[in-house]
Image (cartoon, grey):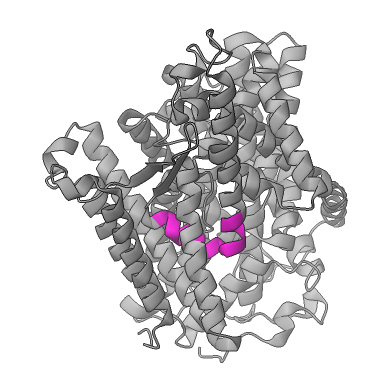
């Protein structure tokens, strides 16, 4: 079956029930095959592991649908010499679930480690939480599928879902290959090996600035940060950088200056400010200010989205009330209503009785109720702005606050209450992430003519399969570096831990947090994007400068090309940057494993060289990496 491309009606213009998908309903092709299952699960593990590393490092993840579609096309069409778009679609659907599990787990459950409850953070707990969240996220979206994809055809744009469909169709007719991801992964992995394992240059470089008390300027010269920067672009990079400058060139020097003559420690620090360096001040003071700004950004974004959320929920419920038609066309087959009912009931009972949960009846009820509400909202918002722009953190914080207050109201407080609250919030967070991913995949499937039931089952399989590897990566990184440190800041989980602990115990330094909230409000009044600036304020400046470097390269590409050529170059750069992120993250996991086993010093063969510790040498290596990225994207060489 060879077709030129998607019909113009794929983007609307006709009622959804009249749209003829790329593969007609009467055509039956293998979808959930042994190949698609195995390759999809492998991609889910890959995307789960890499996004866990990236998220714990910089507080964000990268959507896996388009890279999954590119890799799936390369496998099915390139390696196996088959021409089956539906089989390729199942590979990317299963694979994309890995990123969703990484977001859901990594944003929340590491709070247990940050609190010191390491015995509560087990692979068994992660598996149960992620599995229950995945089941809810899938089952709550199934009844909404027809309303979201068919009834709202041309109304909900699903930008990333449509882009994934275009990539899949382009693969059928000889479009972009996976070579960009593969080359990026190879270069990113080698770069990480030279720095992180062999010690040829330092990954974190910094200079003390004369005239600023504890004024520090630095770079995290990581391939993954450059890749993220290219993907998000210069504007977001500049906003993050501005937040970092505010923290490291204004707040830290001011705290150092005014605190130099104070003999006693100021809460929450246990040592006087005069004895603290820039990193200590960032850890004890700046992170709370940043957390307040991030929380303000999340709630302001949520508030601005409230009309959309309310309308989305009403529309979703309206679609649910209409029900599914009695047609049994292949493209109209879903998981059965009976399976949905017993699946949700099973989640509620499991949350009550399984010892890994310990959420009480109120927590179990919160999981189902808030999971249903936010899953429906997430599925619809994904149709408006895409999975990459889902306000997962804002929705999770709202669910966490409500759940924590409800648990506290029935007397579940202290350590027990904190564990129950974060476990409840984590399950809901996974459901939110999975719901958005599934809705997007169902739209892609609707456009190309996939069987919805197989897409739903595929996302369920991919999510459950990813749970252990995500948990293992978190445990290993904690063992190697420690979560919540400057090496692995775990910004989202740290924020969630502050929210829950603050509500339960009232021990937060509220003056610092409220200062951050005011900064967020000021940004909103000035009509500046709050979250990028707040994240830059919250994270070390070194991370923001690395992201900015990638954004600068994207800016040069945007200025050098235009029209269709620019579109092709940006796509080429995004694929290569995705490879840089994957290569860096995978090699980072390998290096963390070496540290976990105590082998780091044995492989760091260049670390004793004088030049290895020179920050200018490290910066030069980062510039070389940037030149490689630019030359690759700007090159006119056609990919195979």
Q: Which residues are magenta?
A: 224-238
Closer to us: 532 or 205: 205
In percent of width and height, residue 69 lies at 48, 69
382 on left or right of 224: right
Position of residue 38 relative to residue 28, above or below, is: above
In percent of width and height, residue 609 lies at 13, 46
For the C terminus, the image quarter is: bottom left
448 on left or right of 171: right
Position of residue 113 relative to residue 415, above or below, is: below
Position of residue 129 relative to residue 144, above or below, is: above
Can the viewer see residue 108 in this picture? no
Q: Which residue appears at 66% of the width and 61% of the height?
A: 386
Closer to us: 32 or 595: 595
Q: Magenta region, mostly helix, strand or loop? A: helix
Residue 359 figure quarter? top right
338 on left or right of 35: right
């Amino acid at each position: 079956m060879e077709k030129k491309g998607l019909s113009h009606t794929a983007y609307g213009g006709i009622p959804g029930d009249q749209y003829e998908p790329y593969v007609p309903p009467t055509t039956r092709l293998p979808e959930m095959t042994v190949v698609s299952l195995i390759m999809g699960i492998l991609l889910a593990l890959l995307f789960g592991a890499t996004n866990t590393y990236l998220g714990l490092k910089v507080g964000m993840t990268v959507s896996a649908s388009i890279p999954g579609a590119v890799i799936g096309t390369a496998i099915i069409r390139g390696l196996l010499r088959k021409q089956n778009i539906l089989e390729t679609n199942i590979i990317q659907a299963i694979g994309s679930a890995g990123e969703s599990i990484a977001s859901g787990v990594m944003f929340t459950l590491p709070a247990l480690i940050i609190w010191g409850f390491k015995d509560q953070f087990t692979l068994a707990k992660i598996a149960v939480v992620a599995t229950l969240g995945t089941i809810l996220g899938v089952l709550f979206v199934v009844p909404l599928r027809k309303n979201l994809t068919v009834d709202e055809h041309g109304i909900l744009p699903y930008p990333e879902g449509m882009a994934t469909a275009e990539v899949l169709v382009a693969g059928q007719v000889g479009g972009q290959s996976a070579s960009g991801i593969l080359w990026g992964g190879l270069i990113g992995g080698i770069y990480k090996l030279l720095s992180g394992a062999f010690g040829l240059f330092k990954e974190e470089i910094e200079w003390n600035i004369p005239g600023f008390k504890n004024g520090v300027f630095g770079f995290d010269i990581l391939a993954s940060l450059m890749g993220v920067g290219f993907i998000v672009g210069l504007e977001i990079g500049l906003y993050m950088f501005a937040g970092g400058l505010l923290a490291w060139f204004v707040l830290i020097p001011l705290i150092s200056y005014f605190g130099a003559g104070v003999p006693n420690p100021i809460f929450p620090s246990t040592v006087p400010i005069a004895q603290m360096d820039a990193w200590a001040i960032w850890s004890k003071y700046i992170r709370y200010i940043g957390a307040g700004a991030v929380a303000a950004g999340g709630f302001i974004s949520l508030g601005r989205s409230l009309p959309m959320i309310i309308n989305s929920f009403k529309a979703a419920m309206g679609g649910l009330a209409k029900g599914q038609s009695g047609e049994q066309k292949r493209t109209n087959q879903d998981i059965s209503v009976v399976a949905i009912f017993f699946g949700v009931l099973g989640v509620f009972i499991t949350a009550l009785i399984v010892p890994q949960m310990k959420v009480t009846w109120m927590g179990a009820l919160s999981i189902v109720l808030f999971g249903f509400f936010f899953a429906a909202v997430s599925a619809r918002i994904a149709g408006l702005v895409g999975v990459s722009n889902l306000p997962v953190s804002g929705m999770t914080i709202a669910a966490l606050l409500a759940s924590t207050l409800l648990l506290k109201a029935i007397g579940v407080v202290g350590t027990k209450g904190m564990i129950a609250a974060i476990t409840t919030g984590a399950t809901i967070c996974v459901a939110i992430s999975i719901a958005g991913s599934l809705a997007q995949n169902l739209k892609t499937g609707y456009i190309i003519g996939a069987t919805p039931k197989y897409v739903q089952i595929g996302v369920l399989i991919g999510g459950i399969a990813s749970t252990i590897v995500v948990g293992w990566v978190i445990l290993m990184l904690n063992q190697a570096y420690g979560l919540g440190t400057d090496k692995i800041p775990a910004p989202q989980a740290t924020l969630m831990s502050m929210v829950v602990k603050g509500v339960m115990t009232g021990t937060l330094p509220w003056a610092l947090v409220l200062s951050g909230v005011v900064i967020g409000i000021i940004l909103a009044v000035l009509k500046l994007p709050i979250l990028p600036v707040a994240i830059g304020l919250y994270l070390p400046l070194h991370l923001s400068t690395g992201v900015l470097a990638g954004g600068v390269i994207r800016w040069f590409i945007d200025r050098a090309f235009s029209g269709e050529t620019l579109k092709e170059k940006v796509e080429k750069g995004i694929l290569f940057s995705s490879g840089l992120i994957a290569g860096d993250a995978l090699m980072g996991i390998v290096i963390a494993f070496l540290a976990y086993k105590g082998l780091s010093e044995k492989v760091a063969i260049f670390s004793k060289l004088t030049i290895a510790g020179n920050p200018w040498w490290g910066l030069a290596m980062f510039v070389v990496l940037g030149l490689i990225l630019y030359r690759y994207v700007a090159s006119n060489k056609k990919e195979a």
